[in-house]
Amino acid sequence: MMTAPMERIQVLDSIEKDIITCLHSAGQVFVELSKEKSSLKQAENHTQTFLKTLSSVENKLTEQINYLTQVSTGQPHEGSGYASQKVLQMAWHRLEHARSRVNELERLKLKHIQGGRRNIPPNGQGFGGSVPPGSTT
Amino acid sequence: MSGARALPQSKEALLKSYRTRLKDDVKSMLENFEEIVKLAKGEHDTQLSRMTQCEQDTYEMHVRAANIVRAGESLMKLVSDIKQYLILNDFPSVNEAITQNSKLFRTKQAECDQKLMSLRDDMAADLYDLEEEYYSSLNK
């Protein structure tokens, strides 16, 4: 779905391409006329393209300038997307904080597993770190 | 008050200058194109010798072709200026762009928070089991 802000810029892009087509057609006309056996029909076709493109460029640009005359005021635009940007940034920070805490938990778990492998208690329970001897009930 | 009134006038003058530039450039392209095609006929009853007339026509064609290119480049500059003016002053589009961006950011923030909440719920469930295991074990 084309958004309105980008639509106008894309129309202006297409106007730029039309200007280039226009210049190219004019060049083709002269190339055709400069040949020894020039085809009049080709030259006429290119001329028609040149005139048609130039006219469409003029019309489109006039339309754009008319639109701008209607919507422009003298004031600068003071809107901003900063508030929602900041809200997203804070959500990202929350996520990063949760991620760092989960990573820390993971690290602790690995440390305990390695510690548990080194000191396997006699009753076979591998739960937690070093189990002090004589702590059974 | 006169300051606020003076600014729109300069915007009006700017837009008027855009119209003038457009008109002049299109007129220049058309005229020069027409003149080159007329010169290409090559049938002149002139007082100059044929060689000199040819040289003169060649030079004139070069200059007119350069004029066509200059007018084309001036039109490209005009389009670029209009783009710039549009980005800065077209309030409906700017408003819509800001609204869309705000909506996108808030949607992403809601997604982030939703994922965090589901993570919290999963961890709470696991913690419940872990606590039960811990407090019922002999090794507190």
Image (cartoon, grey):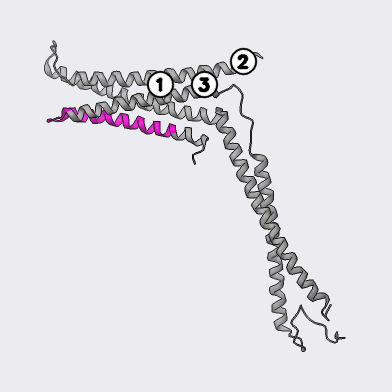
Q: Is residue A68 visible?
A: yes
The amino acid sitting under disc 1 is Leu
- Give the Cα distance between marks 1 and 3: 15 Å
Q: Which structural element holds mark 2?
A: helix
The disc label shown at residue A102, or none = none
Residue A135 picture location, percent across and down? 85, 84
Q: What secondary structure prevails in the magenta region?
A: helix
| Vertical side of A22 occupied by B118: above or below | below
Rendered residue at 43%/33% (across/down): A11
| Side of A82 relative to B68 (left or right) | right
Q: Nearer the viewer, residue A117 or A90?
A: A90
For label 2, count other residues whose C-alpha is less than 10 Å away and answer few (under 14), some (14-19) or many (20+).
Answer: few
Q: Which corner quadrant of the image does residue A37 belong to?
A: top left
- Give the Cα distance between marks 3 and 2: 16 Å
The amino acid sitting under disc 3 is Thr
Q: Residue furthest top?
A: B47
Q: Which residue matches tag 3?
A: A69
- Quadrant of the drawing holding the C terminus of chain B: bottom right
Q: Which structural element holds mark 1?
A: helix
Is A15 in the magenta?
yes
Q: Residue furthest right?
A: A137
Residue B75 picture location, percent across and down? 39, 26
Rendered residue at 33%/19% (across/down): B28
Rendered residue at 61%/38% (across/down): B99
Q: Which residue matches tag 1?
A: B22
- Residue numbers of the magenta segment: A11-40
Looking at marks 1 and 2 on the same chain, the residue that comes earlier in the sequence is marked by: 2
The disc label shown at residue B5, or none = 2
Q: Which structural element holds mark 3?
A: helix
